[in-house]
Amino acid sequence: MFQKILIANRGEIALRVICACKELGIRTVAVYSEADRNSLHARFADEAICIGPAKSARSYLDIPSVISAAEITNANAIHPGYGFLSENADFADVCETSGLRFIGPKPEVIRTMGLKQRARAAMEEHGVPILPGSKGILKSAEDAIETAKTVGYPVMLKASAGGGGRGMRVVRAAEELPALMSQAQAEATAAFSCGDLYLEKLIEAPRHIEFQVLADEHGNVEILGERECTIQRRHQKLLEEAPSPCVSHKLRDSMSKRLKKALRAIGYTNAGTVEFLMDEEGELRFIEVNARIQVEHPVTEFVTGADLVKSQILVAAGLHLDEILPRPPEIRGHAIECRINAEHPETFVPSPGRITGLNLPGGIGIRIDTAAYQDGVIPPYYDSLVAKLIAYGRDRSEAIVRMQRALDMFVVEGIQTSIPLHQKILAHPDFQAGRLDTNFLQRTNLVPK
Amino acid sequence: MTIAEIKELIELFNASGVAELEVQRGEDRVRIRRAGTIQEYSTPMPAGAAPGVAGVAQPPAQPSSAPGAATKEPESTDVIVRSPIVGTYYDAPAPGAAPFVQVGDQVEPGQVLCIIESMKLMNEIEAEVAGTVTSKLVENGRPVEYGEALFALRPR
């Protein structure tokens, strides 16, 4: 078992990892930028090292600084959290050559999953349904037009080195394609240093369904059910829930079986999420794999009883899945998570600043993952997540009323938050009936069109 | 740690110019911070200087007291040289060799003051101003973090 883990992240996820380490008796090292000097993760870790100025590129994303911090504190392993360096295969490589265990999948797997077209091809090869689209990277505009003709418009051009909704363009007719393709290539090159694009059929009003993976280093793979993350704004998830109101037992079982087989064949280890779109016919189509722990992992933890972050550490320490969680995992009850962001609930203008008043709701079935505290500052340099509010109930209705009760009692003063927006979402009859699609916020007029 | 020991720490702290003090002995840990040292963020921090190709752009040098200073308190006119990276501090080019600088030495801009080792690479930290070394603030071989005070220089 590891003696000391360095957490290469900040905010609530850094605290989350510290929690798991504390429970396992593992000492923790936090790294922080100058902007995070008074942050909770630096306070609660056993050791804290300042690694750079506020800008992420010179602190949390600076590989030599992070590795150096691990060296001077004699850490044995690094947990990368989500975002930042968590899907940086080069970083995972550097960890290994520096004698540090990277708590996540192997570098080659991270690399393959990070090239979205390669991940798509690998999944297809192993029997996981994908969206109709290009066979590989698009070679030219003519190639793209040919493919789009076969697939049928509308189509989506996607950056292979991208992900998370970035580097994408919708094309509705052949005439638009060459120009949009150039735009997408330029954007992809600028953002990801790789202009490779692929193409997929566009589903107009999909639902976003993703499956939680946990695999040990001995070839065992488990799927811990699915999450529905359909409520999004500009491809950023606002609310997630488990299980999905539209995934039947049969679909869950059959997809879990297929995924286990595919991920075993790929050699996947540690935690991950396989993302799908559900089309208008209720069919699941693979879009990408996120080879890391996700923001919304708590909803899965509530309905399965698993501790996913602890499990990541135990997997990296060499334990077998049977020693880590009950198999097959049982899905019980229903959980919903609201991402409370520091932004205006209607205009979405970011609202960093000092929190002058804070009341966190509690009570039965409520969990809050946050690094916010009264008089603490939400800095302008990083993401706007203030807190994750998770509600659990014996069924979806109970989870909903618990979430509503908690949102009503969640007081944040000094900054704007998305709490009022979440209240409107929860109150909407379509949400309550489970009538969801990724255009939910626009068609219900909860966001400007 | 006894109450008497903590009282003594508080008295020591109050008498010094130090902003924050953390002491760990075994399982006991005490942190003392001066009121009013929480940073304000009403405006974004100015963009840092672009890092040089050779690696290390220094954080802006400020005349201030060095937190957790090992020996003497630098004067308020002194410029503090701070570590631009995380790593291990060495005051000489090799083990057993003479240190790069001693207290009282005159230094020129570009002159190497020390080495910070990071990931097996030796990074030379250079003086940015001409002046006299008034304090060496870190022991040889100790780990340092970003922004840690290394030297006090009195500019010419």
Image: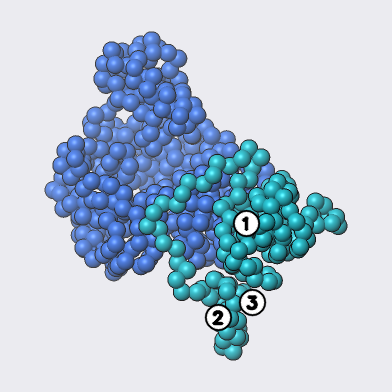
Give the residue type at disc 2: Asn
Question: From this viewpoint, which residue is outermost toward the front?
Answer: B156
The one of A77 and B57 positioned closer to us in this rendering? B57
Which residue was labeled with disc 3? B25
Kindly identify which chain the residue marked by label 1 belongs to.
B
Badge 2 and badge 1 both on one subunit: yes
Q: Colour of chain A?
A: blue
The one of A200 and A213 positioned closer to us in this rendering? A200
Real-space Cα separation, disc 2 to disc 1, in angstroms: 24 Å
Q: How many marks?
A: 3
Q: Determine the secondary structure under disc 1.
A: strand
Question: Residues at badges 1 and 3 in contact (C-beta under 8 Å)?
Answer: no
For residue A364, above or below residue A242: below
Q: Tell me the mark number nearer the camera, choosing from 1 and 3.
A: 1
Counting from the top left corner in percent of width and height, residue A154 is at 27, 21
| Mark 2 vs 3, N-terminal side | 2
| Rendered image quadrant of residue B146 | bottom right
Q: Which chain is cyan?
A: B
Real-space Cα separation, disc 2 to disc 3, in angstroms: 20 Å
**Which numbered disc covers residue B82?**
1
| Mark 1 vs 3, N-terminal side | 3
Give the residue type at disc 3: Arg
